[in-house]
Amino acid sequence: MTFKRLCAMMAVARQGALTLFAVALALWAALGAANAVAYQQSPTIPPTVYTYDLTPTRNYDWSSDEARNNAWAEVHLVAALQGLVNRGYARLYTTYVTSDPRSPGNIDNFWFNVMRAKGGWIENSPLETIDSIEDLAIKFRPYYNGVVVYDLRVPATSNVASTAAGCEKLLPIPYDPRPGSVYSRLVTGGPKLPVCVRLVNENGSSLFTGSETGSAKCDAYLWAKRRYLDTGLCDPKFMAYYVDSWALTGGLKKLQDPYERFALINHDYFISKRAFFFDLSPWSDERPQDDPDQPTGADYRTLISIFDSATHTMTVNEIEHKTPPSPITIGGFIPWAWKYTATAGGSNHEAVATEWRFTAIASCYNACLDADALQFNAMANATFFAHYPLRAKYPQNRPSEQDWYKAGYVDKRGHIMPWTYVTVYSGDYDSAAWLYQKLPTMWLDPARGTVPLGWPFNPNLSDRFPLGFDWARTTASKKDYFLAGDSGAGYLNPGFLDGDRSYSALPSGVDLWAKYCAPYYNKFDLTITDVIDGDAAPMSAATMAAYARFSPGGILAQKTASPYSLIPGTKTPLVAIEGDLPSTNDGADAVAMVKARTDNDTGGGPHFHAFRTVLWTPSQHLKVFNQLEAVPKIVVVDPVTFMALLKLHLDPPNKQ
């Protein structure tokens, strides 16, 4: 995900597409009832679903220090409790994530209603509402051991508390003895929950002072590394990169509705997985604005130490416990709006460069991102959805040779007509949170089904959001095609999987990545992949060969030796993505960009051009596609047809 997507994202928001939620349920009935899978016999059906409404925290007075801290503390606690309560099966569902201020919690309500619809997963599950955090704490007391208390004056301890919550089954609560605080309501008053771990001294003074590294922030993370990651209490296959409580002061005014944008609600899934939480700068040449007095590069050195520990622990697990090797999955994203970027005012490095720097580091450690990037980065209830029963396989519709002949793309000799073929990769879905928030808008758009689109849902997102995958695949039209997005079963830079692995000393991760991706591709019947190369070198021959095995239909990439070719030794097309189409000027700018690229074609054809859009609705695509089809010799096709025609062009039949 890159910073330049913001313009496209905001353009979508301005179109008013979110008003579709007013008719969402009616459209769901029309789209999905006929295809809904009856799961009444599944043992995973929750016998009772408990619901809790977090939307009142959105109305707290953000100018008040006390109210601001309480809003943070309540969301943090409920997310952690969900992570623990929903570990075994789906029990607790919250309402929080909102796309329309006139309807708080409407995203969560939409998906809840999908599950409650006729034939839905929890259609017949009894419901029970819980009204206060005290009642929540009492109701689910068997699922946690006590409390981890953290220090708002050392913001990193809020993330350390989430790590402790997952590893020791604790509820994270900031130290705040004022009357009415969550600490007073649950620790010193109310149920008087026991404090099991203190990240702040009993008198409220800071436990972490910078005595080890010169940075209290880094000291806290290294303490957590030794206690949880080095010992194997954390699952080294999971990390979580979410902004810490420094956001309460440093980030509050940067974005509208900051509490949701802080993505505290996302912690539930990674707490359930015993992930290691962090918020550190990837830059070694500067001091971060949230800790300006630390030694230069302390954040970076701490980050590398965490990655080294995770890979070492994973190796130990493989040897001692016969745990199969796996890439690391990192939830979250660079908090570019608040820290570590020139955009935030605290760095010499731009936002895209910071994204690519962190992705490069992660890729060198065989780690991929479930990239919850601003601005649609909040996702509630992932631990609830994680129990949703997917089908064994989701085959998809594919055009056949007969379809190409019928459309006139191929003549009777099997040769492609000399036209200019244009396809659009309809991104960008390398985050479960983005899919969670945007899929209803996209899928309920009235033009969907009238225009050929390739939907690049990263298949690993099905771990956090299987409901969305099932809903989309069982209600897809014949013009909805599915690809794998950036850059396979998760976002990384394939060019850092072997060769110069600048930030780690690990051997090649190519085979590990291929083995990780293959089952996802098989389950969701995927054969085409978009790759983000970032700061990496172009893919090596070994990496391209691996992609050809699990993604034989084609690869789209940023860095290629030529506009298109076959991967050497294979019949898999490799195509250069020619840029993101602008969403401005009612489609005219996008059409102008395509025409400018196609005007440079030489020879009689055929010619092939691939572009990307970011969060465009089907209606936006339809408008641009209609304008392009009016241009002589330009034909707009879906990505599956595009790759098949390109393959046929590059490897023509031996016919006269």
Image (spheres, rainbow, N blue to C red):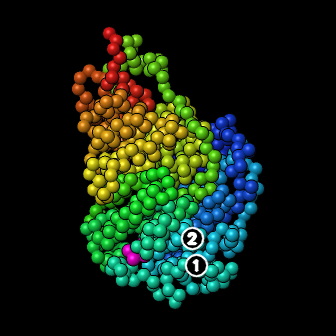
Mark 2 nearby-residue class (10 Å; few <14, some 14–19, many ≥20): many
Where does residue 467 sit, x and y in percent of width and height? 60, 47
Q: Which residue is mark 1?
A: 196
Q: Which secondary structure is most common in the magenta stretch? A: helix
Where does residue 356 sit, x and y in percent of width and height? 33, 55
User: Which residue is more in the foreground, 525 or 457?
Assistant: 525
Query: Tag 1's secondary structure?
Result: strand
Return the residue found at the far bottom: 203
Above-or-below relation of 272 to 559: below
What amino acid does circle 1 point to? Cys
Say if the magenta span includes residue 482.
no
Q: Are marks 1 and 2 in contact (CB under 8 Å)?
A: yes
What amino acid does circle 2 point to? Glu
Residue at 68% from the left image edge and 59% from the top image edge: 91
User: Which residue is more in the foreground, 326 or 588?
Assistant: 326
Where does residue 344 sit, x and y in percent of width and height? 35, 66
Quadrant of residue 142 within the rendered picture = bottom right
Residue at 25% from the left image edge and 35% from the top image edge: 562
Q: Which residues are magenta?
A: 217-221
Say if the magenta span includes residue 220.
yes
Circle number at residue 168: 2
